[in-house]
C-alpha cells in the first residue's frame, strides 16, 4: 500500500461529490429551487430541472402488463464549468469536476450552498451524508496489476494471467467510525494498447437521524473524507503515487 498523503498535487480526481439526503417537509414545492442565481452566485450560469421517471412494463403468464410511465419534477440543477449543485426535494448534492483543487475549497462551497438549501427547504431531518471521489488514473500498461493495485484479482493456472478489463465492487463497514463505503475498481476498455485507464471509485457514507442545523453534521464529512483517503492509499501502490504526487 502507498504511504498516505494529505494531498496529491496532480490528484487524478475526475469528480468529487458531497451529498446530503433529507426527510423533507410535507408538500415541499420544487418551485422553491427555481431561479436561485441571486442566492447561490452569478457564476452558476446554467440551470435545468431534475426529473424522476418511473415506468412499468413486463409479462405475466404470457400476457403483457399494461405499461405506464410517470415523470415528476424533483429539483433544479445549477452548473459552472467545473461545479454542479443539485437542489432536490430529497436532498442537496454538490459535485466538483476536474480539475480538483483542495478539500477546504470544495467542502467550503458545498457547505455554503447547503445553508442556502436549508433556508429554502427546511427539511425535517438529515438521514444520510456521503463523500464520493471518482479517480481515473491513466497508466502505462503492465503485465502484473500488482504493480498498481495492492489486491488485484488472482486466478489459478492455467487461466491466462494478463487482465484486459476489470470490474470489482465491495461494500465495507467501519464499526469504529460508524460509517460504510462502497469501493469500485475498474479497468476501462482499452483505446491505447500501451496504456490502461484505472478507475478507483470510493463512496463513503453514514446513515443519520439528525436535526438539519446541527453543526456536527458538517464534521461528519471530515471523518468520511479521512475514511476515503485511508481506502484510496490502501488500494494503490507507491508507483501510482509517484505519477500523481
Image: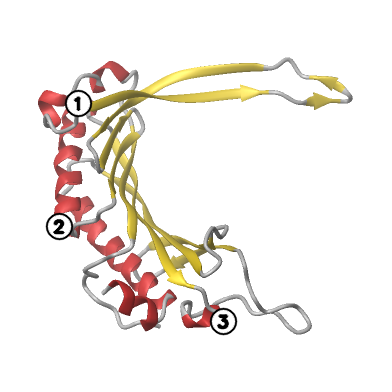
CB atoms at circles 3 and 1 under 8 Å apart? no
CB atoms at circles 2 and 1 under 8 Å apart? no
Query: Which image quadrant for residue 230?
Result: bottom left
Q: Relative to the observer, which residue lies in front, 202 or 224?
A: 202
* Residue at 80%, 25% in the rendered image: 59
Q: Secondary structure at mark 3?
A: loop
Q: Position of residue 45 (x, y in %)?
A: 19, 28
Q: Local crowd at mark 1 within 10 Å, few (<14), some, or many (≥20)?
A: some
Q: Which residue is mark 3?
A: 144
Q: Which residue is mark 2?
A: 104
* Residue at 69%, 17% in the rendered image: 67
Q: Local crowd at mark 3 within 10 Å, few (<14), some, or many (≥20)?
A: few
* Residue at 41%, 69% in the rendered image: 175
Q: Secondary structure at mark 2?
A: helix
Query: Which image quadrant for residue 188?
Result: bottom right
Q: Is 63 positioned to the left or the right of 30 in the image?
A: right
Q: Secondary structure at mark 1?
A: helix
Q: Which residue is mark 1?
A: 120
Comes first in the chain, label 2 or label 1: 2
Query: Which image quadrant for residue 40?
Result: top left
Q: Relative to the observer, which residue lies in front, 192 or 116?
A: 192
Q: Position of residue 216 (x, y in %)?
A: 19, 54
| CA distance separating discs 3 and 2 | 36 Å
Amino acid at each position: 500500500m502507498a504511504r498516505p498523503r494529505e494531498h496529491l498535487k496532480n490528484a487524478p480526481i475526475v469528480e468529487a461529490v458531497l451529498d446530503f439526503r433529507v426527510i423533507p417537509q410535507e408538500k415541499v414545492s420544487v418551485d422553491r429551487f427555481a431561479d436561485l442565481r441571486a442566492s447561490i452566485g452569478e457564476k452558476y450560469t446554467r440551470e435545468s430541472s431534475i426529473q424522476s421517471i418511473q415506468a412499468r412494463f413486463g409479462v405475466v403468464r404470457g400476457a403483457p402488463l399494461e405499461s405506464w410511465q410517470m415523470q415528476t419534477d424533483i429539483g433544479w440543477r445549477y452548473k459552472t464549468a467545473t461545479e454542479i449543485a443539485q437542489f432536490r426535494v430529497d436532498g442537496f448534492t454538490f459535485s466538483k469536476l476536474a480539475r480538483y483543487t483542495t478539500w477546504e475549497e470544495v467542502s467550503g462551497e458545498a457547505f455554503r450552498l447547503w445553508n442556502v438549501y436549508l433556508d429554502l427547504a427546511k427539511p425535517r431531518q438529515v438521514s444520510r451524508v456521503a463523500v464520493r471521489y471518482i479517480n481515473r488514473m491513466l497508466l502505462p500498461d503492465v503485465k502484473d496489476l500488482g504493480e498498481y493495485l495492492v489486491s488485484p484479482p488472482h486466478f489459478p493456472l492455467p487461466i491466462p494471467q494478463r487482465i484486459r478489463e476489470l470490474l470489482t465492487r465491495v461494500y465495507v463497514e467501519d464499526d469504529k467510525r460508524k460509517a460504510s463505503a462502497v469501493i469500485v475498481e475498474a479497468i476501462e476498455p482499452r483505446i491505447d494498447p500501451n496504456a490502461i485507464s484505472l478507475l478507483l471509485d470510493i463512496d463513503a457514507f453514514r446513515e443519520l437521524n439528525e436535526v438539519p442545523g446541527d453543526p456536527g453534521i458538517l464534521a461528519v464529512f471530515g471523518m468520511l473524507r479521512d475514511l476515503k483517503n485511508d481506502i484510496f492509499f490502501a488500494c494503490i501502490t507507491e508507483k501510482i503515487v509517484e505519477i500523481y504526487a
